[in-house]
Image: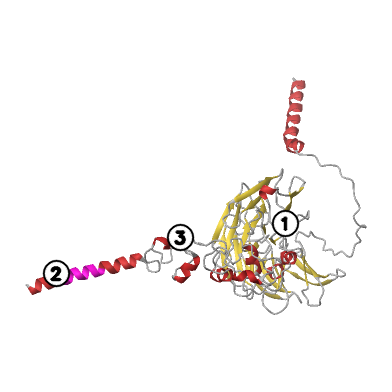
């Protein structure tokens, strides 16, 4: 009897071990690689200790205006530490909670010419701190602790930086950078540990906010008012943060993000539809990075998984990626500033690294002086270095390309709103070439006899005239008889 029980136990143990190791047995084994020396071994420049964990990612910036980069990082000791980049000495630190895993963003949010440091904390607060001396500019209190890291950008087109951040209280917050007042908040189904990315993903000339939530969803939110553009649902929680680039070679920004369901997702930025997903053998909490890592002038995706692998994803000719990268990695850029003022200095919706690749001026939003921003020209396949294309009429709709930009129409589509009328004709007729039903009467302009006057209004006027005419005739006959 004892022997039989022992045999059963052994069989169960073998079965359990097999079930637990099956995914790893089925995985392609790592190829053995010989170590290659590409440079001399690194030499320690300095190190700085706090006797606690560093879960926050450092940011680099000249926060004290000395012409040199400082290192800004937060630790699980609850402090922000600002260090001399040359020797690692402490310039100042400030306590902002018991522990901090949010990573700092750097930007001039109060328009004083210096950099501020913005960060979230376990104590539920978002802090804005003077970069030079560590004094508090403002703090904003959310409903729970903050694991998300802030992003900075002019999301409401007022010429100043706003702060966008998620909280474990289920909300995304947009905060006025100057005084810490709330602009808007958007509520998701669960807490938010993901960090936002900012970019014009629907090509409307305005910034959107993209962020993941522990409710399994990726959200795209209009930056101006906090309204929902779209959301995409995965099969498990999202702790990864999104990145933005042209994944399908349509010259528009798409969203790439990981999920706890073991997949990496590429999502169409305009409508939230799935472009593709790539399955790993472990949860993907890592934030992807986008860039041309093999020199083929196209984007590759690099991302880590809990299966122990780092994946570099390329695309064949059928599913070709483009070259545009906007929010490239965690923190937006290689300095992890999370600040569009550094990522896109002239706010033409071309990132600085793409401007350098194309040859445009990253500090001039219209490099060729043709009244069309560089990013708009690239998006529509025009040449941002050739001013002569401003006078062309690519789609033969009676509008020059520069006029198409001015009126918000598509230079490659003669009927932008699909109402059956050429864009140029609509402007001559004083109808809206971007709205198929200018007078909102339910009849598209191309089929509307009076496209600028609501037909219901005309119908009511005619009805009133008929009623008054009938009454007039009735009174006239009654009293004349």
Q: Position of residue 155 (x, y in %)?
A: 61, 68
Q: Residues within 10 Å of mark 1 (few under 14, many from 20)?
A: many
Q: Nearer the viewer, mark 3 or mark 2?
A: 3
CA gap, disc 2 and disc 1: 79 Å
Closer-to-camera residue (312/396): 396
CA gap, disc 3 and disc 2: 45 Å
Residue 468 lies in the magenta-colored region: yes
Does any portion of residue 265 appear in the rendered image? yes
Give the quarter of the image for residue 403.
bottom right
The residue indicated by pointer 1 is 290
Closer-to-camera residue (45/339): 339
Does any portion of residue 143 appear in the rendered image? no
Asked if marks 3 and 2 touch (Cβ < 8 Å), the reply is: no
| Region in magenta | 464-475
Q: Position of residue 62 (x, y in %)?
A: 78, 73
Characterize the magenta stretch by its predominant secondary structure. Answer: helix
Closer-to-camera residue (346/134): 346
The residue indicated by pointer 3 is 420
Of marks 3 and 2, which one's residue comes earlier in the chain?
3
Asked if marks 2 and 1 touch (Cβ < 8 Å), the reply is: no
């Amino acid at each position: 009897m004892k022997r039989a029980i022992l045999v059963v136990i052994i069989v169960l143990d073998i079965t359990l071990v097999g079930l637990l190791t099956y995914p790893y047995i089925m995985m392609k084994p790592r190829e053995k690689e010989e170590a290659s020396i590409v440079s001399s071994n690194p030499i320690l420049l300095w190190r700085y200790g706090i006797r606690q964990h560093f879960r926050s990612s450092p940011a680099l910036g000249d926060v004290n205006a000395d012409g040199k980069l400082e290192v800004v990082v937060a630790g699980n000791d609850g402090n922000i530490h600002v260090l001399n980049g040359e020797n690692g000495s402490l310039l100042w630190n400030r306590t902002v909670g018991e522990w901090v895993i949010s990573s700092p963003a750097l930007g001039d949010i109060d328009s004083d010419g210096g950099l501020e440091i913005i960060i979230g904390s376990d104590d539920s607060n978002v802090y804005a701190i003077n970069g030079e001396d560590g004094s508090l500019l403002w703090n904003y209190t959310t409903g729970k602790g903050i694991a998300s890291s802030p992003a900075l950008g002019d999301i409401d087109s007022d010429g100043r930086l706003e702060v966008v951040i998620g909280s474990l209280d289920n909300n995304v917050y947009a905060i006025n950078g100057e005084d810490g007042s709330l602009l808007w908040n958007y509520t998701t189904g669960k807490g938010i540990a993901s960090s936002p990315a900012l970019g014009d993903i629907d090509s409307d000339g305005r910034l959107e906010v993209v962020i993941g939530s522990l409710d399994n969803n990726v959200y795209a939110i209009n930056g101006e008012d906090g309204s929902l553009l779209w959301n995409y649902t995965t099969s498990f929680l999202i702790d990864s943060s999104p990145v933005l680039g042209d994944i399908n070679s349509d010259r528009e920004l798409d969203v790439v993000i990981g999920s706890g369901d073991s997949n990496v997702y590429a999502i169409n930025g305009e409508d939230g539809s799935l472009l593709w997903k790539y399955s790993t053998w472990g949860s993907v909490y890592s934030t992807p990075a986008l860039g041309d890592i093999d020199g083929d002038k196209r984007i590759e995706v690099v991302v880590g998984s809990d299966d122990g692998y780092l994946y570099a994803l390329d695309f064949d000719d059928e599913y070709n990626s483009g070259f545009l990268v906007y929010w490239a990695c965690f923190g937006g850029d290689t300095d992890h500033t999370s600040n569009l003022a550094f990522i896109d200095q002239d706010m033409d919706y071309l990132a600085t690294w793409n401007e350098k690749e194309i040859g445009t001026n990253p500090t001039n939003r219209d490099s060729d002086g043709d009244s069309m921003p560089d990013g708009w020209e690239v998006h529509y396949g025009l040449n941002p270095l050739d001013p002569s294309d401003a006078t062309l009429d690519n789609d033969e709709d009676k509008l020059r390309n520069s006029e198409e930009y001015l009126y918000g129409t598509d230079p490659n589509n003669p009927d932008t709103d699909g109402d059956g009328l050429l864009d140029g004709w609509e402007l001559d007729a004083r109808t809206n070439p971007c709205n198929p039903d200018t007078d909102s009467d339910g009849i598209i302009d191309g089929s509307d006899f009076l496209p600028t006057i609501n037909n219901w209004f005309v119908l009511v006027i005619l009805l009133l005239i008929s009623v008054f005419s009938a009454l007039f005739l009735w009174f006239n006959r009654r009293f004349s008889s």
